[in-house]
Image (tube, helix red, strand yellow):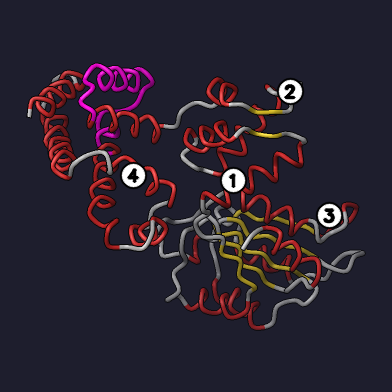
Amino acid sequence: MNIQNLTQQLTSSPQPVYLIQSEQLYILEKARQACKGLIALEEQAMNYASYDMDDVDLEVALADAATIPFFGERRVVVLEKPLFLTGETKKQRANHNLDALLAYLERPEPDTTLVFLAPYEKLDKRKKVVKALLKVAEVFDFGVISERDIHELINTDMREHGFKIEPAAMNVLIQRTNADLTIIMQELGKLYLYCYQEKVINRAAVEDLVTKSLGENVFDLVTAVLARKTTTALTLYHELRINGEEPLKMNALLIGQFRLLLQVKGLMPKVRNEKELATQLKVHPYRVKLANQASSRFTMQDLSRAYLGLFDLEKQLKSTQRDPEILFELFMINFVNK
């Protein structure tokens, strides 16, 4: 499923209610623009509206949806961040009358397209309102975007802007952004300006402009630890501290990365492919791919020793006032000596 499918469906046969679900803000923005495109530009001021459900009462948006179009054939009303569709207990500032929504879904206005943009991994399907919505709405759940899909989306954006990207540059771009499509598209804007004359984005341009994500820095740190490169590991740790990263947060990320390496090392022989394992572990396939490549170079014993050592480091970070960098250095010395 992709944005083209949504656009084609909207163009050929727009439905009264849509549910569009994705954790990628880039995808949701593309979906929003596709829905907005249902309304002619000169009519959008009167027949297009978007409401943030954090701030606006649901009944206000539903009243707008129930209003017939002004001097046009269709009205589009978008509901942003409908947290009431999930199992989260965070209180929103607005008041939401879900009975009013249930009543609207029973008889939706035929000349209005009501769109729910849900930036969530999953909805609470036990809720009455979610059951009613799924029964009525045209559902577009974009789920986890594969690395292949990310490549295609980048290449499509490149063609639209008249650019090309070298394969090595593509790999570095995906790695440095941790395969986050929203961040990738933000970085492409800078790369287009930087490479405007050549119209070709190379590896050097990506390395110059795209800052490593915290996730990639932590992955580099994990690699240095396992390779017993003490100086490299200490330098990376020091740089992260200079950049304002909190020791406990960094340690938690390290523990999480080693946990993933252990899981992939242990479970990979029992599944058909990385995609299947990513589904089981509920993580992005790209992270499983990197973890599989990394874990194959090290023993289960080394991974376990580092994992347990980091738990001991966490206890020390919470119970002493010693310099975190000294504690990390002691962790490295202990790991390397063993």
Q: Is residue 337 left or right of residue 7?
A: left
- At label 4, which amino acid type do we have? Ala
Give the Cα separation between the discs numbered 3 and 4.
Answer: 47 Å
Q: Is residue 333 above or below residue 283?
A: above
The residue wearing badge 4 is 291
Near-viewer residue (210 or 148): 148
Contact flag, marks 3 and 4 (Cβ < 8 Å): no
- At label 2, which amino acid type do we have? Glu
Give the Cα separation between the discs numbered 1 and 3.
Answer: 33 Å
Characterize the local packing of mark 2: few (<14), some (14-19) or many (20 or more) Cα atoms within 10 angstroms: few
Q: Nearer the viewer, mark 1 or mark 3?
A: 1
Near-viewer residue (173 or 330): 173
Q: Is residue 228 magenta?
A: yes
**For residue 12, what is the image quadrant?**
bottom right
Task: Point out residue 224 in the picture as x, y percentages from the top left corner.
Answer: 27, 27
Looking at the rendering, the stretch of residues picked out in magenta corresponds to 227-252
* Quadrant including the C terminus: top left
Which mark, by number, is residue 198? 2
The residue wearing badge 1 is 151
Q: Earlier in the sequence, mark 4 or mark 2?
A: 2
Task: Point out residue 321 in the picture as x, y percentages from the top left corner.
Answer: 13, 22
- At label 1, which amino acid type do we have? His
Q: Is residue 213 magenta?
A: no
